[in-house]
Structure formats: structure tokens, C-alpha cells
């Protein structure tokens, strides 16, 4: 440990790179004891080691080291309902899995899925479209939906109906999970952990 010195009764500090006597003569290390005394430097008591809970500070009034409690670390801000809403929306928009494929579920995606499911419902009830009919929508090409990996997934009307139901359940499950978190007396700090949310 580096020795600390008090200069003319001041607080302990390391010796300077240059010191001056009363006649403004400069002295530089290595200092000898006689020079230190003449320059007004006195060896200070050793500084105690800091601990996790306390740090050593010089008490000028009593001319001694004292141990002072460290301030507590700043606390993390408490999560809010808005934080939960943001996590809910992020998870909903991250998408869901249907028939082994991942599909996007951003607001526009959900709107499109709902529209397709409504058309599929009408095709089945009003036009008696059957399973396996991939042109139930009245177009000249098979009905397909683009998965998150950009692959084209063919879907007949019953499949689109089921697809829409899974999309709706995906949003609903996350909405109720968010509600349950906000209803707690205290929102847990790990509210974004997967354990609080349904599987995608």
C-alpha cells in the first residue's frame, strides 16, 4: 500500500511530484525524511481497506480515519402497467405457430387473417365449399398464406377458419396474461419472463 502523508495538517494524500520550501526551492522524489519534515509532510496513519458495505474517509476534526457506510445502490424502477402492455404487444406481434409453421401477427396481419377467416366461413356456409378445395375463394389459383419464412402454405376454407381461430386465441391468451399480471398487488420485476406468458 502506498504511504500517505499529511501536508501542514491537511488530509492524507500521496506525495506530490514536486514540492517547494519556504524559499520556493523545488524538491522532487525520492524525498528523504529530513526534506519531508522541512517541507511540512508528516506520515499519515494507514488508510483502512474499504469493504463491500463501508468506505474509509478522513475525519479532519478528529484527525483519524473513519469507516462510512456506502450509499445503497440505486433501485430499479418498478415495472408499470404500460411496461406490461408493451411486452404483451411485442409477444402478440412476434407471431404464432400453426400447422408447424410460424406466422406473423402484427396488427395488419391479424386484420388480414380475420378477413380471410370471415370469407372462408361464408364460403363454407353459403357456397358449401368442402375440405381439400384450395380455390374456395373464387380465384384461379390455390389459396395460400405466406408464413414467416416466406414459404407459401396452401389452405382450404376449413383450414383458414382454424387458422383464424388460432390467431384469435393467440391474441386473447396474451391479453388475459397481461391482465393477470396487472391485477397483482405488485408487478413482478421479471414480468417479461416466459413463465408469465403463454407459448406462441
Image (cartoon, helix red, strand yellow):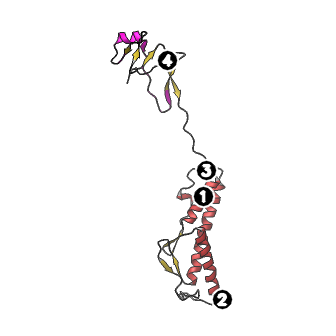
Q: CA distance from mark 3 to mark 2?
A: 50 Å
Front: mark 3 or 1: 1
Estimate the x, y position of residue 32 in percent, counting from the top left.
33, 13
Crowding around mark 3 (Cα neighbors within 10 Å: few <14, some 14 to 19, many 20+) is some
- Say which element carries label 2: helix
Q: SS for tag 3?
A: loop
The residue under the point 63% across, 51% down is 80
Task: Give me the residue at 52% from left, 86% from top.
Answer: 142
Of the numbered discs 3 and 2, the one sitting upstream in the chain is: 3
Q: Which residue is mark 3?
A: 79
Q: Nearer the viewer, residue 56 or 184?
A: 56
Question: Does the magenta-highlighted stretch encompass residue 32?
Answer: yes
Are the two marked residues, 1 and 2, in contact with CB atoms closer than 8 angstroms? Answer: no
Q: Which residue is mark 1?
A: 86
Q: Which mark is residue 64?
A: 4
Question: Mark 1 or 2 closer to N-term?
Answer: 1
Q: Is residue 170 magenta?
A: no
Residues rendered magenta in the picture = 27-55
The kind of secondary structure element at disc 4 is: strand
Identify the residue at horizontal 34%, vertical 15% (top origin). Answer: 31
Q: Is residue 176 left or right of residue 67?
A: right
Amino acid at each position: 500500500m502506498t504511504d500517505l502523508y499529511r501536508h501542514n495538517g491537511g488530509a492524507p494524500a500521496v506525495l506530490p511530484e514536486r514540492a517547494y520550501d519556504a524559499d520556493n526551492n523545488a524538491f522532487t522524489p525520492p524525498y528523504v525524511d529530513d526534506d519531508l519534515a522541512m517541507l511540512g509532510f508528516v506520515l499519515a496513519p494507514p488508510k483502512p481497506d474499504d469493504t463491500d458495505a463501508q468506505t474509509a474517509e478522513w475525519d479532519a476534526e478528529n484527525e483519524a480515519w473513519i469507516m462510512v457506510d456506502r450509499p445503497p445502490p440505486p433501485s430499479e424502477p418498478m415495472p408499470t402497467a404500460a411496461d406490461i402492455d408493451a411486452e404483451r404487444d411485442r409477444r402478440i406481434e412476434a407471431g404464432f405457430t400453426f400447422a408447424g409453421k410460424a406466422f406473423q401477427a402484427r396488427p395488419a396481419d391479424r386484420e388480414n387473417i380475420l378477413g380471410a377467416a370471415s370469407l372462408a366461413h361464408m364460403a363454407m356456409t353459403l357456397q358449401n365449399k368442402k375440405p381439400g378445395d384450395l380455390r374456395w375463394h373464387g380465384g384461379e389459383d390455390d389459396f395460400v398464406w405466406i408464413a414467416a419464412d416466406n414459404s407459401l402454405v396452401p389452405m382450404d376454407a376449413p383450414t383458414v377458419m382454424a387458422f383464424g381461430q388460432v390467431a384469435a386465441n393467440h391474441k386473447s391468451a396474451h391479453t388475459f396474461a397481461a391482465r393477470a399480471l396487472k391485477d397483482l398487488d405488485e408487478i413482478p420485476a421479471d414480468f417479461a419472463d416466459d413463465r408469465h406468458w403463454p407459448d406462441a
